[in-house]
Image (cartoon, helix red, strand yellow):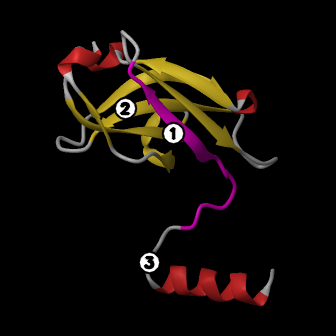
Amino acid sequence: MAPLADEINVAADAAGLDRRQNDGIALTNVQVRRDHPTYIRYRWSYHDRSPDKFTVWLRNVKTQDYYKADASVHTSDRHGRISLDSLNHKTGKYQLVLTKYNNYNDVYARSYTFSIHSSDF
């Protein structure tokens, strides 16, 4: 490993930050499309150590509740689209979260925060 990368990893370990070792799924683009009804398009990147599939959630920033938006996404697809059906007309500020298959506590990637309004349903 390069010396700079080693220094960064040592600093992250010293700060108690959890380094992910073998997954490598990263959100590269998230778009909240306000057509009627609103939907969310997203893209991700991955590498050969990434898992074969993952789960997509919508996370309410205020309540910390997770709503399963897509139970099983194949990593090799590289893009996806979800509706807001899982929210049951619950408005608020949300994030798109990619996690280990069916485990919202094991987060691979999290989007920026976006608002969902009653007019989005």
Q: Secondary structure at mark 3?
A: loop
Considering depth in this image, is 48 or 89 the residue closer to the camera? 89
Instruction: Give x and y (percent) for residue 106.
Output: 47, 47
Q: Earlier in the sequence, mark 3 or mark 1?
A: 3
User: Residue at the location (50% across, 68% down)?
Assistant: 18
Give the distance between the C-alpha atoms of the residues marked 3 and 2, in whole angstroms.
27 Å
Residue at the spot 65% in from the left edge and 29% down from the top edge = 79
Is residue 74 found left or right of 120 in the rendered image? Answer: right
**Residue 46 highlighted magenta (yes or no):** no
Give the CA separation, mark 2 to mark 1. 9 Å
Q: What label sits on residue 86 in the rendered view?
A: none
| Residue for badge 3 | 16
**Amino acid type assigned to the residue bearing label 2 in the image:** Leu
Q: Quadrant of residue 8?
A: bottom right
In the rendered view, tell whether residue 37 sits above or below residue 17.
above
Location of the N terminus by quadrant is bottom right
User: Which residue has dot 2 on it?
Assistant: 58
In what element is the residue under mark 1? strand
Q: Nearer the viewer, residue 24 or 114?
A: 114
Task: Locate residue 75 relative to residue 56 in the image: left or right.
Answer: right
In the image, which is nearer the foreground, mark 3 or mark 2? Answer: 2
SS label for mark 2: strand
Q: Which residue is mark 1?
A: 98
**In the picture, residue 86 is in which quadrant?**
top left
Task: Please state which amino acid type lies under the numbered disc 1.
Answer: Leu
